[in-house]
Image (cartoon, rainbow, N blue to C red):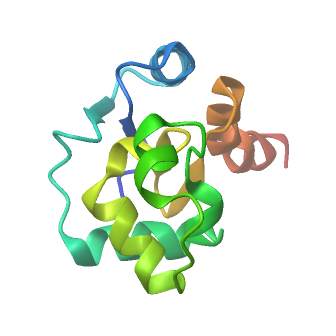
Amino acid sequence: MIVDEREILIYYNPDSNSDLKTVAFAQSITPFVKSYTYQQAPISNLRWEQIFQAIGMPPKEMLNKSDPYYQENIRGHEFDDDGWMKILRHNPQLIKAPIAIRGDKVILCESPKDIYKLTEVEEVEKEV
């Protein structure tokens, strides 16, 4: 699941101002940004699983628990990690923050400035 080092791939919720800021910050890092809303993301189930594993966070922690759909349909239910991943794959609008990929690094951008974590390795290498 490697993306070119010059490119940033972002999956985001277009209804979130914070997500839109994250996309804008990414565009300030590189002109090579591919951004997809979660609904239009061309992602297979296997790719979603790879993304979730690469983030290194339990799928349940990636949920936006304030979302009305979550409140009405999911709150109070318990699932294993596979069950939570299935919920997120079928309801990607429930992912609480944009997912950004650059090279082999995948992050959940809980703050728009988290996108800059994708440049940390690059900056350290320049200093050496």
Question: In this view of the protein, can residue 9 be seen by the observer?
Answer: no
Q: Is residue 17 above or below residue 84?
A: above
Q: Nearer the viewer, residue 1 or 54?
A: 54
Residue occupying image coordinates x 41% and y 55%: 73
In this rendering, position of residue 120 left or right of residue 54: right
Residue 36 location (% of width, % of height)? 26, 35
Q: Say which quarter of the image contains residue 110.
A: top right
In this rendering, position of residue 29 left or right of residue 88: right
Q: Is residue 47 above or below residue 29?
A: below
Question: In this view of the protein, can residue 83 be seen by the observer?
Answer: yes
Residue 4 location (% of width, % of height)? 36, 51
Q: Nearer the viewer, residue 52 or 61?
A: 61
Residue occupying image coordinates x 34% and y 21%: 14
Q: Nearer the viewer, residue 6 or 54?
A: 54
Residue occupying image coordinates x 37% and y 66%: 87
Q: How many marks?
A: 0
Residue occupying image coordinates x 38% and y 30%: 13
Residue 33 location (% of width, % of height)? 34, 29
Q: Is residue 62 above or below residue 28?
A: below
Which corner quadrant holds the N terminus? bottom left
In this rendering, position of residue 5 left or right of residue 61: left
Q: Is residue 118 above or below residue 32?
A: below
Q: Nearer the viewer, residue 25 or 71?
A: 71
- Which residue reaches farthest right? 128
